[in-house]
Amino acid sequence: MRPRPIRIVVYCGLLLSGSLWTLPAVAAITAEKGAEGVVFNLDGARLRLQVWTDRVVRVTYAPGDALPDAKSLSVIAKPAHVRWEFRETPESFVVATPWVEARVDRKNGAVTLLDEKGTAYVAEAPGGRAFSPTTVKNLDAQQAEQDFVLAPDEAILGQQANGPWNYRGQTVRLLQSNMNIALPVLVSSRGYGVLWDNPAITTVAVGASGKEGLVSWTSEVARSIDYYFLAGPDLSQVVADYRVLTGIAPMLAKWVFGFWQCREHYETQTEIRPTLRTANYSRAGSSSGHSARCFACTEAARPRKCGNSTRPPMPSW
């Protein structure tokens, strides 16, 4: 009697609680090159890399079939006409200028920013993008989160006028308040900067508890993730690129560059004048808190108001 053959069936999947769960196929990422950059079609989302200058790359990501057409409240520059190239490798899509290179991983869509020699400045964490219902009460909107990989020896600077020198291990809430000026910009000891272009209240965790090894940006309201990568390699170049994006701050009048008397506040002009007479400064600038007038806005200058484009004449003390 011949033995009966044994049939072996192999299921490509995972058996969970008695049911078969098949691993979803990863949709192939496709790319479309345009005049200013490349738009990538990720499964259920869009990613765009825009070449802003030869050292600045804008990264925008949003779920859905199209990127929102949102006007920036901080960036006034337009993309410059610079030389750049787009190429593909088995592992990634590459957008490159003579000074900076942006790579999109074919497996997960994460972006890595590198210098002209191929050394990484910073990389998005794989799976580091997330949209979820906002935590703001009575508001039907989405909040957005973007995680970047934090290098072991990296120092993160910037973000607040009165914050710590190095934000590593810190969490900061970018919200304007007394003595705290929120700046959605960070610079790194590795020679790059990031301008986070979202005016909503934003929390930045830099290697903090629960986010070890990551720099995490979370904006309470967002239609997209939108940031500008500024390549150095020195920080003076990063600041120069930031000024190109947001506009060059005008220089103040020469009479301002001198002694500045600053205190919590002055109630009246009578309180201000003795201070200047004591210091023996005929012209000075003053920075003070509430209930104060700037020095140019004096009794003699009325009815003209402080803030006019033409400064009122300085009084004689």
Image: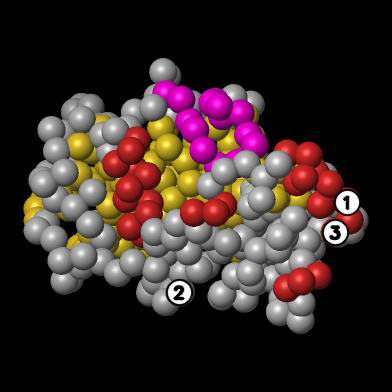
Residue 133 appears at what percent x and percent y?
Answer: 65, 61
Q: Are marks 1 and 2 in contact (CB under 8 Å)?
A: no
**Which scheme is used to colour this image of the protein?**
secondary structure
Residue farthest top in this picture: 153
Q: Please report whichever mark, 2 or 3, sits nearer to the chain's N-terminal start.
A: 2
Nearest the viewer among 8 and 37 is 37
Q: Quadrant of residue 165?
A: top right
Residue drawn at point x = 14 percent, y = 50 percent: 97
Callout 2 touching callout 3 (CB < 8 Å): no
Q: Main secondary structure of the magenta part?
A: loop
Magenta highlight on residue 166: yes
Magenta residues, as a range?
Answer: 154-168
Mark 3 surroundings within 10 Å by alpha-carbon count, few (fewer than 14), some (14 through 19), many (20 or more): some
Secondary structure category for the residue under label 1: helix
State the CA–CA distance, disc 2 to disc 3: 42 Å
Q: Which residue is mark 2?
A: 71
The reply, left or right, for residue 146 in relation to residue 107 is right
Q: Answer yes or no: do the residues labelled 3 and 1 have beta carbons within 8 Å? A: yes
Amino acid at pointer 2: Lys
The stretch drawn in magenta includes residue 164: yes
**Residue closer to the observer: 165 or 97:** 165
Name the residue tied to disc 1: 271
Q: Which mark is residue 269?
A: 3
The reply to whether residue 148 is in sight is yes
Q: Residue at x 44, y 60 (%)?
A: 250
Compute the Cα span from label 3 to label 1. Answer: 5 Å
**Along the viewing direction, whichever of 25 and 298 lies nearer the viewer:** 298
Against 23, is 77 above or below?
below
Q: Is 99 placed left or right of 299 in the picture?
A: left
